[in-house]
Image (tube, grey):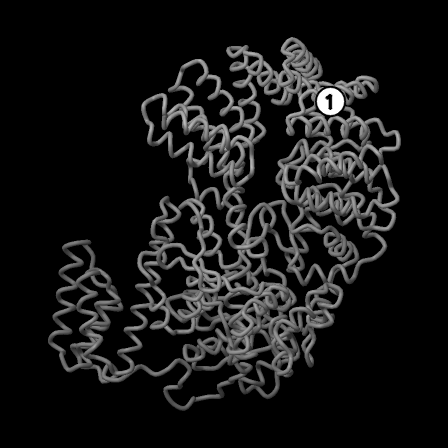
Amino acid sequence: MGDELRFSVLGPVQAWRDGRELELGSPQQRLVLAVLLLADGRAVGGDQLMDALWGQARPRTALQVLRTYVSRLRAVLGADALVSVGDGYALRAGACDAAELRMLYGEGRYAEALALWRGEPLAGLGGDYAEAQRARLAEQRLAALEHRLGQDLDEGKHAEVVVELSTLCAEYPTRERLRGLLMLGLYRGGRQAEAIGVYTDTRRLLADELGVDPSPELAELYQRIISADPALGRAPARPGTAAGPPARRVPRQLPADVADFTGRRSEVEAMAQALRPGEASALVVCAVAGAGGVGKTTLAVHVAHRLAGDYPDGQLFVDLRGSGVQPLEAELVLGAFLRALGVEEAPEEPAERAALYRSMVADRRMLVVLDNAAGVAQVRPLLPGSATCGVLVTSRARLIGLTGARQLDLEVLGPVAALRLLSGIVGESRVAAERGAAMDLVAACGFLPLAIRIAAARLAARPGWSVAGMRDRLSDERRRLSELRAGDLAIEATFALGYEQLDEAHARAFRLLAVPDMADVSLRAAAALLDLPEQEAEAVCEALVDVSMLESLSPGRYRFHDLLRVFARSRADSGAGAALDRLLEYSAAAVAGRFRSLFPGDLRAELLPTGECRDAFDPAETDALLSVVRQAATREHADRYRLAWIVDMLTDVAPESVAFQHTLDLLVARAGGEPRAEGLARYLRSTLSSADREARRSDALAAIDLAQGDPYVTAVATASLGVQAYDDGDYQGSVELIRRGVEIFAGRGDRGAQALWLGLLARSLAAADEPGQAVEAARSAYRVHAELGGGTPRHPWAPYQLAFTLQAVGSLEEALRMYESAVTGFREIGELDWIGTAATRMAGIYLTLGDHARALELAEQGLAALREADDEHWQGKALMILGQALTATGQRERGHVCHAEALEIFDRLSLPEAEDVRTLLAAVNA
């Protein structure tokens, strides 16, 4: 991306590209964007997004509506900016003011944070989610304001602060933090009596309004003010300064804090709050877990330095080497700790060493940092026994057995924090000059802090290199790991430490799960890849999650960090091909199972022999499966004919997406020298709505030439030409071509396909003014569908096709009954566009029957569904009928607006219906 995206939620939800504001659509669509922005680059699941949009009132078509919103946002923001991740989405480009706010807040730059606000956050968005986020952001602003006022007081700006605080206390009368700051400001300004008066007023107000006393903190400040505590007259000392010389040996073992520490505000605050000495009755342990390179040590050291002043008796630090092949033994660490505490000769027995260590720190306020732990057994002997101490542990595996520990799972940085880290090392001006390339670079690093530091260090050492050049070096997955090496830092070496600790079974799983080109894998897909029963596969995957070699998005779904996937693939062995084959076999069986349930009797499922699969294929997995099909199609000895068969069945059980176009383009390109595979792929490509008419016709003709006697490809390609002839207005030619295809299906005993195409033949016969033959063909198709479905057609296509034909020949009452049946079926399988199409056709019938109110109602329903499905052609048709119904009910102005909108659509798409609308407009105007 060479252009720059900026977003704002601290006011109305807005976006800009290179300074130009973008049109983000409806409030609901802006709400989807807001949820993704507030996730700060992390994936947001579909259920979470739908909860934010509708809460408990989620409509049946919620998933389709959500996908429509996402599709529209992608059209505005770019496909690379808004990406699919598992069953959800993530925003992986641009800078957001909310992320900038968190960053500035975490760095204590409160005045700059407050300057970002542009009014009420998420202005104009409704619903419980938006209200909750508004309240959260407003609280964040108020907290930042309190911090900024505290800073101003520390800088001696007493007079200015008192003026501002007086106004704020009137606006927020029960907020004790503001009252305390006002008391302190007045006291430091020589106005002790007024400061005491503020406390008196506050105590009375809290008692009257809330029935409570002031907090202990405010009461303590009052006592210090009335006793004229000298310490209140000056700014407080910075954390880390000592009150006086130590009475005994005080170890200060913390490594240096990094000067460019970036982000992690919420994590830092949570850890500091947990570890700050207070009223705890037992030892406080904070355990940080995460993958190699995610920044656990850097975070731990940063927090430890921040807390150093709270632990004046010293800080102990040790690298336990838990990620290596020989972790440190606890007794060796105890010996080192005891020497640091002044014990010259430690006991030999491990238990005695541990007991002496606990005794030495029992009455001290000490912070113990145990970095890179191997496990609980290594950590437990190193824990003090006193509540006056604090312990900070880092590890790759979650230390589940560490009873009472505050667990924190550390993830990668968000996009804004990642960019700030890069800027801190490379230089802000250099990054600002190539901001788009810089964002691509940190994304190629998977937002992993260590990877970003390495890439940044290489750039900093090479002033002549461009950021775009470094990005391009990382774009090749095969050399990415070797590029991420600088001095003694190397991503590959970091990952290798974790990999080498896996036993063979888990190392094999680690390699095989990275084989498919999928953003994440389901548990069932993992079981197929690993050739294990589901329960065993889950245990293996969860074990990899426990040691941070794999991530779990939600129960039963797993993914790799991008760089870990690259590392896993670099370790691939001869089992990778077989694993991909097993995944394809499992997926083909699941697709075939769903296909058979919807199209019983269609021989396509029988022409693709698959094993039994008890799992129903989930259409939400379509793009992921197509990605695997593309991956398989590039292999040297791929069975591309079989791959095309999988795509063929997918086209009938899943909604069309751009992934179908990409997959079929690749199959056509790769199938040179394989005529049957190329023929089937070309036929399938000719059916895509995204292709232009000439390309569709060319593909269908080529498919017939390439079929080489394959009756199925010959039949469907011929019949497909008939559909194209119908679209061109050549109804007689359409009848001849589709009939030829139907005869081939009948000759090979494929009753399912025969019934499907008979329905389309009926449509062409009706248009060719053959009503008797049309109804006969349509009823025959419905009858076969019903017989194959055990008495009732399984797919709503059957009643829809019959309804269309009955409508065309004037049997309107029966047509309405069939359309209603079709709409019910389309709702069950989530076909939003066909719900809208059927409702629009029903509206047309009621318009003909003179029931204008019912026509108006159905046209509105159809238009709503078609807009959610993003079907512009049929939106225009629905608007035409809606305009007629409105005009007929006396709403001429609104009807004119609908007709004008329909005309704009048809003109823009160069569709012949534009002339029909002009005729309607002329008639109304006359």
Closer-to-camera residue (132/278) = 132
Residue drawn at x 83%, y 52% as measured from the top left? 575
Tell me if residue 614 comes above or below residue 106 in the rendering. Answer: above
User: Dividing the image into 4 quarters, which one contains the N terminus?
Assistant: bottom right
Closer-to-camera residue (248/538) = 538
Which percent across, then down, holds residue 651? 68, 34
Residue drawn at x 61%, y 52% as measured from the top left? 552
Closer-to-camera residue (58/197) = 58
Q: Quadrant of residue 316?
A: bottom right
Q: Which residue is the site of mark 1?
A: 738
Left or right: residue 329 compared with residue 58? right
What element does badge 1 sit on?
Answer: helix
Quick one: label 1, few (<14), some, or many (20+) residues within 10 Å? Answer: many
Tell me if residue 862 comes above or below residue 129 in the rendering. Answer: above
Task: Using the rendered image of the protein, determine whether residue 261 is visible from the camera's viewpoint.
Answer: yes
Q: Quadrant of residue 595?
A: top right
Which percent across, then down, holds residue 96? 45, 62
Q: Quadrant of residue 100?
A: bottom left
Residue drawn at x 33%, y 59% as measured from the top left? 139
